[in-house]
Image (cartoon, rainbow, N blue to C red):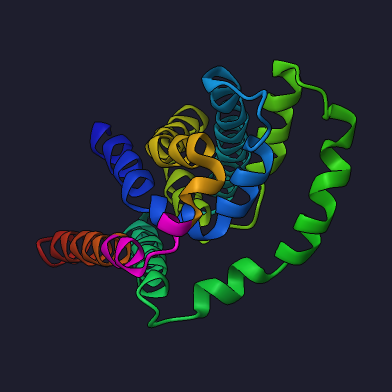
Amino acid sequence: MIDIFLSSFFIGVIGSTHCLSMCAGISCLVCMNKKNSNIHIIMYNLGRISSYVIAGILVTYLSSLLFSLISLSKYLITLKILANLLVCFIGLYLLGISSIIKSLEHFGFFIWTKSFSKLTKPFSSNSLTSRIFTGFIWGWIPCGLVYSSLSYAALTGDILQGSLIMLCFGLGTLPMMFFVGKASLQSKGLIFKKYIKYIGGLSLVIYGLFSIILNLRSVLSI
């Protein structure tokens, strides 16, 4: 099972370029306050990652109920392949080849951004608690990369494993998102450079295809 935790962390790391495309503006917005320090930026991201963990708990709880009602074991490989296909589509989106993920993410994104300031207004102070809450709300932004990790978590049907998968994924995104928060507006010229997105996109496609091939081989060897 350790391999799926490492895979989730790896997806978080290489998928960080996607996070930059979707979350850079929000990251700069919440972190550009001059009073922010490293600990404040960490608190923002702690709140964000905690939302992933809670989402993982909710998804795996629902999937465990579904597994108890319906035997999906014989379809497990198919579901894993579909999850890896989603990773591939995210990579293709970063490469500018497919817009499926973009359409998926933009569904509800406009409403979410409009609601963000209203949801976090009561917690607009400079306290660490307000930063954690702001990061927690930030973590619920519609994101194909999060959806793909949640699909891995759901397939376990185990709340502990699902939450750990999302924790590993969140920790994988932490270095890049901390950099964006630290550099704030100074990083805007960097984060949109195409070659960064291309490297991340290509890595996700390769990872997704490799995982699909492994799943297919396990089916053919049965």
Q: Is residue 192 magenta?
A: yes
Q: Quadrant of the C terminus?
A: bottom left
Residue 111 placement, left or right of 218 = right
x, y percent for residue 88: 34, 68
Observer-nearest of 83 and 128: 128
Q: Quadrant of residue 77?
A: bottom left
Q: Residue at x 55, y 33 (%)?
A: 49
Q: Which residues are magenta?
A: 189-199
Residue 26 rendering spot, x and y as whole percentages: 64, 49
Total labels drawn: 0
Secondary structure mostly seen in magenta is: helix
Decide if residue 31 is on the left or right side of residue 118: left
Magenta-drawn stretch contains 116: no
Quadrant housing residue 172: top left
| Quarter of image, res 52 | top right
The vertical placement of 119 against 33, above or below, is below
What residue is at 45 percent from the left and 58 percent from the top? 189
Quadrant of the image containing the N terminus: top left
**Residue 167 sits above or below residue 144 on the image:** above
In percent of width and height, residue 118 lies at: 88, 45
Measured along the vertical axis of the image, is residue 173 above or below residue 216?
Answer: above
Examine the rendering and report whether any part of residue 75 can be seen. yes
Camera-side residue of 139 and 78 = 139
Taking depth in this image into account, of 161 and 183 the one nearest to the observer is 183
Is residue 162 in view from this perspective?
Answer: no
x and y percentages locating residue 121 in the rendered image: 87, 36
